Image (cartoon, rainbow, N blue to C red):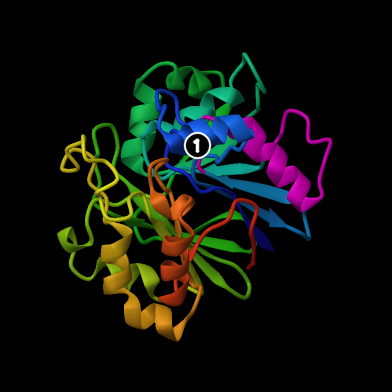
Amino acid sequence: MELFVLGIAQDGGVPQLGCDRPCCAAARAEGRALYPSCLGVVARDTGQLLLVEATPRIEEQVAMLHRLAGLQDRGRRPVDAVLLTHAHIGHYLGLLWFGREVAATAELPAWCSPRMAAFLRSNGPWRQLVDLHELTLRECAPRAPFAPLPGLEVTAIPVPHRDEFSDTMAFRLRGPHRTVLFVPDVDAWERAPGLLEELLAGADVAYVDGTFWDGSELPDRDLAEIRHPPMTDTMQRLGAFARAHPGAVRFLHLNHTNPALRDPAIAARVAAAGFAIAQQGERQPL
């Protein structure tokens, strides 16, 4: 069983619509694209595929997963199950591509929290996916392990975040040999004392929220409205863990303005502290 990183950017990706700063202008000129944060898992014995998040770049990301997994000719069953952390656009908008206008899937299991499931059942256009049996919503209770694929145990852990439409979950994915943590969005570690320790318990690799470097990259925005723990804060809190497990804590969900995406000095500082910036297409055995 293997896990692949299919995207490392914040919801809008890189380049981001409406951004004419050098960070996105250069990406457009170079034809470089970073997709919203997303994981894929392949069970080699069955060929089954799990998609963790359904982003607006779902077609490119599922195609990447097929290529990395060495699979093809999947037709209207592009993946076998989906996990959803919460209802912000970079994490669930891609569900629409499973609908009648595109893939028209049949009873595709989509795992999410009860509140997220209630939102999808009650609001269009998501409700249509359920009514037409293109998606089957599977509710996962907090801290109650479930198996979206045979041999893969997943545990949803609530995290504080802007929860306008749903609550927000982190996922701990445990395969036969290794465990990977996925927490792309969280407001602030101090809002939930003990949360970091709970999330990291038993994790061999941790993909964590790296939206902003230190917040100074967005001088014109009130970060209280878009709260995320700066990478600098997370690195300070997890310094001892990172030194003991170099490269195990890997940042993703990086905003297009985050200098860690393009400044070699900052990337070197991250690496020297025992952390890493996740790379699109990287592989983790499970």
Residue 125 appears left or right of 30: left
List the residue tagged with mark 1.
14
Q: Foreground residue, 213 or 283?
A: 213
| Callout 1 amino acid | Val
| Quadrant placement of the C terminus | bottom right
| Quadrant placement of the N terminus | bottom right
Badge 1 density bin: few <14, some 14–19, many ≥20, Cα 10 Å: many
Magenta segment: 53-78
Residue 152 appears left or right of 156: right
x and y, in percent, of residue 147 in the image:
55, 57
Q: Foreground residue, 27 or 143?
A: 27
Q: Is residue 38 visible?
A: yes
Name above or below for residue 212 compared with residue 2: above
Report the residue at 47% width, 28% height from top.
93
Quadrant location of residue 108?
Answer: top right
Report the residue at 32% width, 74% height from top.
238
Residue 168 within the segment the image draws in magenta = no
x and y, in percent, of residue 139 in the image:
42, 44
Q: Secondary structure at mark 1?
A: loop
x and y, in percent, of residue 2 in the image:
67, 61
Report the residue at 21% width, 36% height from top.
221
Q: Foreground residue, 70 or 219?
A: 219
Quadrant location of residue 257?
Answer: top left
Name above or below for residue 90 compared with residue 85: above
